[in-house]
Amino acid sequence: MSQPPHLPSPWTPEQVQWLKRIGFAILVLLTIFFLWQIRSILPLFLFGFFIAYLLDPLVDRLEERGFSRTGGTVVVFSVFFLAALGLGLILVPPLIDQVSSLISAFLPPKGRYYLLAVQGIEFIEEKVLKGEIPAFWEQAIQRVLEQLGNFLLAKLQGAISTLTGLFSLVILPFIVFFGLQVVDPLRERIRWWVPAEYREPLSELTREVGQLVGRYVRGYIVLCFAVGAAETFFLLICRWLFGIDYVLAVGIFGGATYAIPYFGALLTTLIGGLVAYTTAQHQQILCAVIVAIGLTVINQAFDWLIMPRVVGRQVGLHPLTVLFAVMAGGTMFGIWGMLLAVPIAGAVKLALQILFPRHFAPMTEEANAVKMTAGDYEKRGEGQ
């Protein structure tokens, strides 16, 4: 049976190339439009996949010990879920109560910090200006504090409704569980999008960099928990000595903002000192000074002594290199530069080790000894 003659294509190769480009551009625009339409649910899924990404190494270790992927996922997910549930039931209710009370203290007419601002105005009137401040200044301060308090309360209520919403509580565990099962297959699928000639070196580099970033994030999360625990313990001592309030709120706030270099520590110290001064039952000024100094010492100790060692060990960098990278990143790009400096420095180190293994490979003491011995033999040979 004879085959029908092959008809020539009505499109030239240049036209086909342009059609592909137009189709790709339309696909990108449709994807962006689709993501914009579902933007309200994206944070939930991104947060779930982020947790799965952090827990994935634990599942991989269980697989190395003979567990199936599903079995390892069940074990890791169960331990994480029970720990998170227990911690949430213990800490979340008193934390919400303290934060709500702290924010309400900014609201007029009886808010503690509003009354403190009024006292400050009266002091300036009597001692500094020797006269009366125009009424619009008092009205402006009242409006600012009222708007600030209402804004913070609205944000707190929105965060609580988001975290405790039925949809989040039901869907998030499923996202984490199934995310743990698809992390590795998804990574392999992305690997095959790379051209074959670059697949192996890029695959090794991306795997190493991904592991480095994961270790860095996990290390920083541990540091934030440690800072929060240390500051909470210190504030509990101050509560026992001076009777201050909002201990849990300030301590957890300090741990959460520790990830923001310098600014987080400064804000925690200011809030802690203000809370100590306004809630201490006796010796308010002494209590505020002790709290401010104590929080500063804790943050500086973690910044200069603990963080470089812990984070540097996680990413394979010397503590001096970590300090240099953080300061250089802050000088060049501000807060974001300080946050991203360490993983970028670690990624650069890995890239150099993979691309130039002869010059940048990690050297152990044994390898250094062998290298020195070989160098001595070469010198002896040249001398002869």
Image (cartoon, rainbow, N blue to C red):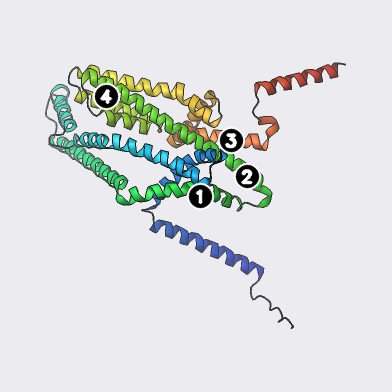
Mark 4 to mark 2: distance in Å?
50 Å
Mark 3 to mark 4: distance in Å?
41 Å
Q: Residue 46 appears at what percent x and percent y?
A: 43, 48
Q: Is residue 200 left or right of residue 94?
A: right
Closer to the N terminus: mark 3 or mark 4? Answer: 4
Can you identify the residue that label 4 sits on?
273
Can you identify the residue that label 3 sits on?
348
Question: Which-is-in-front pick, marks 2 and 3?
Answer: 2
Mark 4 to mark 1: distance in Å?
47 Å
Q: Above or below — where is 12 with respect to 214?
A: below
- Residue farthest to the bottom? 1
Q: Label 4 amino acid?
A: Gly
Q: Secondary structure at mark 2?
A: helix
Q: Label 3 amino acid?
A: Val
Q: Quadrant of residue 383?
A: top right
For the point 28% across and 44% down, the residue is 160
The image's mark for residue 202 is 2
Closer to the N terminus: mark 4 or mark 1? Answer: 1
Along the viewing direction, whichever of 380 and 28 lies nearer the viewer:
380
Mark 2 to mark 1: distance in Å?
21 Å
Q: Is residue 289 left or right of residue 341?
A: left
Disc 3 vs disc 1: Cβ atoms closer than 8 Å? Answer: no
Q: Label 1 amino acid?
A: Val
Question: Which-is-in-front pick, marks 2 and 1?
Answer: 1
For the point 27% across and 35% down, the residue is 95
Q: Residue 100 appears at what percent x and percent y?
A: 22, 37
Q: Quadrant of residue 370?
A: top right
> Around disc 2, counting alpha carbons within 10 Å, would you say few (fewer than 14), some (14 to 19), or many (20 or more)?
some
Q: Residue 82 appears at what percent x and percent y?
A: 37, 39
